[in-house]
Amino acid sequence: MIKVKDLTKYYNNFLALDKINFEISKGEIVGLLGPNGAGKTTTLRLLTGYLKPTSGSIEVKGYNIKDNYLKIKSIIGYLPESVPIYKNLMVYEYLTYVGTIRRIDKKQLLAKIKSVIDRCKIKDIIEKDIGDLSKGLLQRVGLASVLLHDPEVLILDEPTTGLDPNQILEIRDLIKEIGKKKTVILSSHILSEVEATCSRIIIINKGKIVADGTPTELKEKYFDKTIIKLLLKKAKFYEVKSYFQNIEDIVSINLIEEKDDLIDLELVLKKDIREKIYNIIKQKEWIILEFSKKKTSLEKIFKQITTEN
Amino acid sequence: MQRILAICFKDLKDYFYSPIAYIIISIFILVTGWFFFSTFFIINQASLRDFFELLPFTLSFIVPAITMRSFSEEFNIGSYEILVTFPVKLNDIILGKFLALCCFMFFMLIPTIFFPLSISLIGKLDWGPVICGYIGAFLLGISYVSIGIFSSSLTKNQINSFIIGALICILLSLIDKLLLFMPESFVNFFNYLSSNFHFQNFSKGVFDLRDVIYFFSIIFVFLYATNISLSYRK
């Protein structure tokens, strides 16, 4: 559906995107993830034709954006961050405006408006001024306006920023439902967001793609190590260290805190060798207060790969 | 065409839903009416010469005050991003906005018909120059509109856009007054550039195609410049 090749964007001398490559097939919900200023919005703006790439190519449904930008714009529905729509129009006026500008047939327009109003649950507010709406309602009106022409690709920039938890859940459900039939690309700097809605995650940092895959793939690829948290009594750190140092599968031993005869440790293991560790501790007669395997989360992966570069 | 009209109607709605439109129209009528009638009875002639005499200057301030919104506001609230990601050509957007402001110009001139109507009650008014003058005023107005659109495409700050637009308009209106300071060989050239020079032909009742061409070339040049300035934003 979407092919991006060597996409590069300079703002004057600032390199915002550095030779990005990815492909998105039909029906995927892709989350573009990255810290602030990583190049998420730039990528989306290039895809929608708002910005022109410095070099590289974008193809949507086989059309090149240079030659067929009007065609591509009619395939895509794009909602920028914070839903910048005209504050002094009423909701139905805005929807009619979008419909006319998108050249929807007048006979179909009313039916289409009705259908998006139902889908986005904004029936009660269609006669309100857009400027009077709350953030969540505004987001839904925005979504309704981009769904109006039945786009095959939906591009949403930070669709849940500024919403309260209930609204976030509602918008997520809506996006998931839309994603059943359409290709959706959304950007976010919140991981749980992307994890909850997307089937695939592309992590961008400093204008480069640093990771690409399904949430589980990413977990396996970037976090194959096991971390054990240990809280021991009647033990000294140097003693513990000397015993554990010789075990091959332990990558590192990190002391978190040492206080009197209490030590708090973190062991990074290549393999899960908890039994072996237990046996050593038992043998030395240290007292175990805590012995647990730390869960690896995408949050960690995200932090790891966006800070190490 | 449908898209141009859609943008045009949306912009018109936008202008007339906000109080600014009415405030500006009222100011326009008040200012022109005041300057016109304050000397009208002293001169004691049933003509609109004085009204048309000052029009280039009043419009130099009034028009940029209306047009400053057109692109600057879109940049400022970010709706420009949505607008250009619709399947519309840049020229369609510019034409739509231009058309909306032309309509606005038209609505702004309509109430001033009150001036010639009231004069015709108390004196014998020659309607020829008046009609010709109104055609000229409309052309002058929409050529200033194109300047205003251009200046608002440069910045997202409406005040800056107003100042730039007003400066260009004032320069065009004043250039023929500055001819004294210019070398002789340039006089004709600068006189031709002056909007006041061309407009005054209309107000005298002289309908010359060259003046029409002048105003349309101003419109073309500035709308084209708008296109360049907007393309540069990418």
Image (cartoon, grey):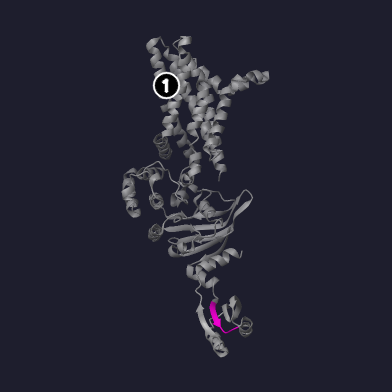
Q: Which of A3/B68 is in front?
A: B68
Q: Is residue A140 magenta?
A: no
The magenta-colored residue range is: A227-235
Disc 1 element: helix
Q: Is A5 positioned to the left or the right of A135 in the image? A: right
Q: Is residue B89 above or below residue B192?
A: below
Furthest residue toward front: A260
* Residue B75, percent from left and from top: 50, 43
Q: Which residue is mark 1?
A: B112
* Residue A11, percent from left and from top: 60, 49
Residue A150 in view here: no
Q: Is A160 positioned to the left or the right of A203 in the image? A: left
Residue A165 in view here: yes
* Residue A87, percent from left and from top: 42, 43
Q: Which of B203/A266 is in front?
A: A266
Q: Is residue A230 magenta?
A: yes
Which residue is located at x 55 percent, y 19 percent? B197
Which residue is located at x 40 percent, y 34 percent? B16
- The C terminus of chain A, quarter of image: bottom right
Q: Which of A244/A143 is in front?
A: A244
Label 1 is placed on what type of residue?
Thr
Q: Is residue B212 above or below residue A120?
A: above
Q: Chain of mark 1?
A: B
Furthest residue toward bottom: A283
Q: How many marks?
A: 1
* Residue A7, percent from left and from top: 57, 55
Q: Which of A2/A228 is in front?
A: A228
Which residue is located at x 53 percent, y 31 percent? B147
Q: Residues within 10 Å of mark 1 (few under 14, many from 20)?
A: some
Is most of the magenta stretch helix, strand or loop?
strand
